[in-house]
Amino acid sequence: MMLSLTLLPVWLLSLALPAHTVLHEQRALQPSSYSPSAAPAHPAAVLPTPLRFFLRQSNLALAEQALLNLSLPSSPAFRHHWTQQQVDAFFRPGEDSARAVEAWLEAAGVPREQVRRSRSGGSVDVFGLSVGTAQELLNTIYSLYTHAASGTQHLAARAYHLPAAVSAHVDFVYPTLQFDARPERQGRRGPAPAVLVPPERRGEEAKWAKTGEKRDRVSLGAPGSGSLPKLGGGVPGPDCLGSEQGISVCGQFIVPQCLEKLYNYPAPNTSCPASTPLRLGIVEYTPQSYLPADLDLFFQYYLPPAQGARPQLQAIDGGYAQSQYTGFGYQGESDLDLQYAMALSWPELPALYQVGDMTGEASFGNFLDALDARFCTYQGGDDAVFDESFPNPSPGECCAQIPRAGPPVAGVWLSRACVDGYDHPEDCGTVPKTTVISTSYNYNEQDLTPSYMQRQCTEYLKLGLQGITVVFSSGDYGVAGNTGSCIDPSTGTYDYAGSMFVPSFPSTCPWVLSVGATQTAPGAADPFAQPEVACQDVITSGGGFSNVFPRPAYQEGAVRGYMESYPPDGDMGFNKGDMRAYPDISANGAAYLVAVDGEFQTVYGTSASAPVVASMIAKLNSALASQGNAPHALRSIGFINPVLYTPVPGRVNDIVSGSNPGCGTGGFNAAPGWDPVTGMGTPNFESLLQLYTALG
């Protein structure tokens, strides 16, 4: 399908632009499934959409300090978290921003009748603009790109500029860098193998991607997605199973009792019945789903009272616990997350945020929409490449009952009648917020535009202001990106032999808690007699430095200390500016015993580390809530990073051995204090509990 560009007379060829413009945004490379077309974009063609200037939110410069004020024990505002209404009022774009853009457009000669503000006030839109005029306004060049599989043409730029005085008021301009022309998807069963997935890793993907076109990525929940956990080499025998084995297996496998011993964590109170206070939320992306029988098999051995217990389903955009596709590629992530989250948080049951239908490709934007209705339309809404668009009536192979968000219609869930796409509007503000949210999925920074990442990162900051701890896994490939991808510095494109490192998003957002992976010391007769080391069996702990986000104040001292005392090899391919460093903390990520599809497997990944840390924070919140004299606003920890980075002996267990190799290098080395392999170390639950209890 060809992009239709209506031709009209070229006007305003000499615009009265201010002399000084600045680079506002640029993209290193286009998605790998697009290539530049032979024919350039015609300057007299009309842009396919209005040229939209999305306004910068108010008080962004003050937002970091506002969050720190809520997160530092020395601050009078410590843990006095905000309401959603207070957050909305604080960030609402100011009238001066809209006027600055409108005044510039008027000075440039754009007719006033073509300029309108959006209904929400979040953007200034210019209608009927020609490509040539847009190019001169933005000091850019638009090109046509062709999608390799469908032949769809897409108009995009590689960089654009704005006057300095206008740039200060604008988040981003659309359409410019965004590759959001979604090719035809009717009949699409699911995502096909990503370009970056090596052939030996595509077995499970081939089962999922039965039809449909090749895209430039694997959707988050599809088998083959690089952020999913990895299988180990051995399957445990019956003699290794059962709570009676206790910590005796911890030198070979990880079970809940091992984590309790490693991190000074309390055993579950098995005398209490299950409860549902909604403190912990586990995020899963369809087709990843748990099998109820797997939960019961795991709890049979490690927490008998939990047999029959289930997480609280919070369905988002048609999400449900699918069971028509089974095996490690479909249940490995969710079974791992929920078995350990439930074991560690018992008797409280976590919420399961199940995101997306069976034929779509739901992502982080869709999840954030469901938490905050305002996010659905903020800055133009979701990205149509990396987030799913709804309604999605795509037909699939299986009949299933997918619950709608909200109450059932006429007392029953609507049947999809052999259509397993979610053919309803997207869920906006439909699910409750838990005080801790754990996600074990990620993208490479390289795949996303800065505006896409910044939009979501600001939302994570807003959640922090509301007392919510947002936890993400740091990745399983050391300094490389998903599936071990690196970048060729001469071309800026992916190359497994490349030398440039690939940071992981959202871990590089400064307002999330990024969790890396450790393991017990290999070969140790007593796994508790010596400190853990950075995980290097099957996976390596993701870590490094962002290429997008500057370093936040709370980690400046710790990161600077590492760079000065343990300077990395100067030839290594990472951003050596003052950039956000990750991970922040770690937990064991090696050889977890997980019941998957009716049998136990050994599972590895930061996919395990993240829900373990999240469960511990949720347990801390439970203890704070039990303090009857504590105001409601003080019953959650919220943004914990500044506390973790405060150097107090015993607050964390320092990890000083191991590294995270990748991209033809040995990667970074673990070291005393913070390091870009394991962060500040692993948590000491009792020490953190004493701290927060003493602070009231």
Image (cartoon, rainbow, N blue to C red):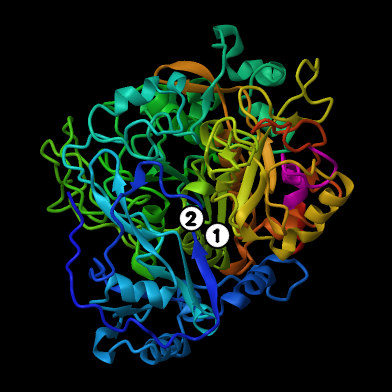
Quarter of the image for residue 504 reads: top right
Q: Is residue 637 visible?
A: no
Residue 258, relative to residue 558: is it above or below? above
Q: Number of marks in the image?
A: 2
Observer-nearest residue: 260 or 202? 202
Which secondary structure class fits the magenta region best?
A: loop
Image location (x, y in percent) of residue 498:
60, 35
Q: Secondary structure at mark 1?
A: loop
Quarter of the image for residue 606 reads: top right
Image location (x, y in percent) of residue 60:
56, 75
Name the residue carrying label 1: 468
Image location (x, y in percent) of residue 341:
53, 38
Image location (x, y in percent) of residue 629:
64, 67
Direction from residue 243 to residue 396 in the image, left or right: left
- For the C terminus, the image quarter is bottom right
Mark 2 Cα shell of 10 Å, populated few (<14), some (14-19), many (≥20):
many
Residue 633, disc? none
- Residue shown at 63% from the left, 41% from the top: 500
Residue 89, relative to residue 646: is it above or below? below
